[in-house]
Amino acid sequence: MAEGSKNNKIVVGMSGGVDSAVAAYLLKKQGYETIGVFMRNWEESDDDGVCTADEDYNYVRKVCEQIGISYYTVNFTREYWDRVFEYFLKELRAGRTPNPDVMCNKEIKFKAFLEFAMKLDASFLATGHYARIAEKDGKKLLLRGEDDNKDQTYFLYNLGQKELEKTMFPIGEIKKSEVRRIAKEAGLASAQRKDSTGICFIGERDFNKFIAKYLPSEGGDIINIKTGEKAGSHNGLMFYTLGQRKGLGIGGNSKMSEPWFVAGKDIENNILYAVQGDDDVLYSTGCEVSGLSFVAGSAPSDEFKCTVRLRHRQKDRGCTVKVEGDAAQVIFDDRQRAVTPGQSAVFYDGEVCLGGGIVEKAWSANDTV
C-alpha cells in the first residue's frame, strides 16, 4: 500500500496493555500507517492516590515510541460518565447487575471513538480485542477469538454491520501466549504488564467502598426465602447479585455445612432474600431479554435454536429464542443457575456471535412459558 494513502491509515485504540500494544506492532509491521490513540475515559485516582489513566498513558507513549508510530490522547470522560457510568448507577439502584464493559464498547469504543478515528481520515479502527471478523454472503460476521479462553465477543455483541465494516481485530487470530511472546521478542514496554481485571473504572479497588461514594447505601434484613424468617442483615442491596455466596455473613444454625446464596431482592422493602444450599429457587427455565441487537442487522428468524452465554466465562448453553420485536423469550434446553437481570444474554451459532440483549426477568421452574 502507498504510504500515507487513506487505505493505509489505521487508528489503534491503545489502553497501555499488552494486547493493544501487539495489535499496533503487528499493523506497523504489515506496512500500515499506524496511529496509536489513548482514550481517557476515567480520571479518578485509585486508593493509593495514583491516577491510573496517567500510568496507562505512559505505557502507550513508550510502546508507540518503540514501534515508531505517532500517538495521541482523546478525552471521553464526559461521554463515559453520561453514557456508561450513569447507566451503571441507574441499574444498581434498580437492583440489577449491569455490565458496563458491554456499554463501553457500544457507546464509547465503537461509537464515539470510531467517529473520532474516521475524523482522522482513517480507513479502520483497530483494537486489541480477542475476536475475529469474516464475511459471508456480503455480510460481516463476528467470530469468537482463536483463543477461546480469552474470547471477548460476549462484550461485543452490539456491533453491527456499520461498525464491523470499519473495524479490525489484529490479535483475534492468535492466542494470548503468542501475544506475550511477540511483545517480549519485540521488547515492548508492556510485554510483562499484568492484565487488567474487574470493572474498568473500579479496577483492583474494593467494589463496595467505591460504589458507596456514589450511591447511598441502606442496610436491611436478609430473609430466608423458604421460611420467611430473618437470617441476617445486609449492607445495601446494590452490593449483592443473584447466586452470590461470599459476603452474606449468615450463620448460627445447625446446617452450617451448607452455604447461603442470594436468591432475590425486594427493592421497595429493602429486603435481600437468601437460600441455604443449592436450592431449586436459584434455577431458571428461561428468561425475557430486551434491547435485542443482531450483528447481521436482524434475527436469523422469528424462532431459532442456538447457544447462549449469560456470563462472560460461562460455557455455552443450548436454548430456543423466540423473537418479539426488540425483545425475546429465551427458553433453555436445561435449567440455568442464577440468571440475573441486567446482565447480557449473548447468542451463538458455533463460532459465530449472532447478537444478544439484556436479561429482564428469569423464569423459575414453576413458571409456564
Image: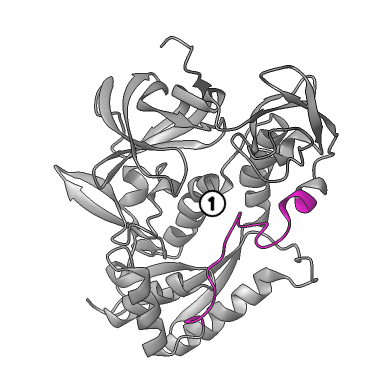
**Residues in magenta, as a range:** 190-210
Q: Is residue 198 magenta?
A: yes
Considering the whole magenta stretch, tell me its main secondary structure. Answer: loop
Quarter holding residue 27: bottom left
Quarter holding residue 205: bottom right
Q: Is residue 213 magenta?
A: no
Q: Nearer the viewer, residue 318 or 39?
A: 318
Circle 1 — which element? helix
Left or right of 175? Residue 217 is: right
Left or right of 49? Residue 63 is: left
Query: The N terminus lies in which quarter of the figure?
Result: bottom left
Q: Where is 74 relative to 283, above or below? A: below
Q: Nearer the viewer, residue 254 or 85?
A: 254
Residue 55 placed where, x, y %? 65, 76
Q: Where is 56 relative to 212, above or below? A: below
Query: The C terminus lies in which quarter of the figure?
Result: top left
- Which residue matches tag 1? 108
Report whether residue 346 is seen.
Answer: yes
Q: Residue at x 57, y 33 (%)?
A: 342
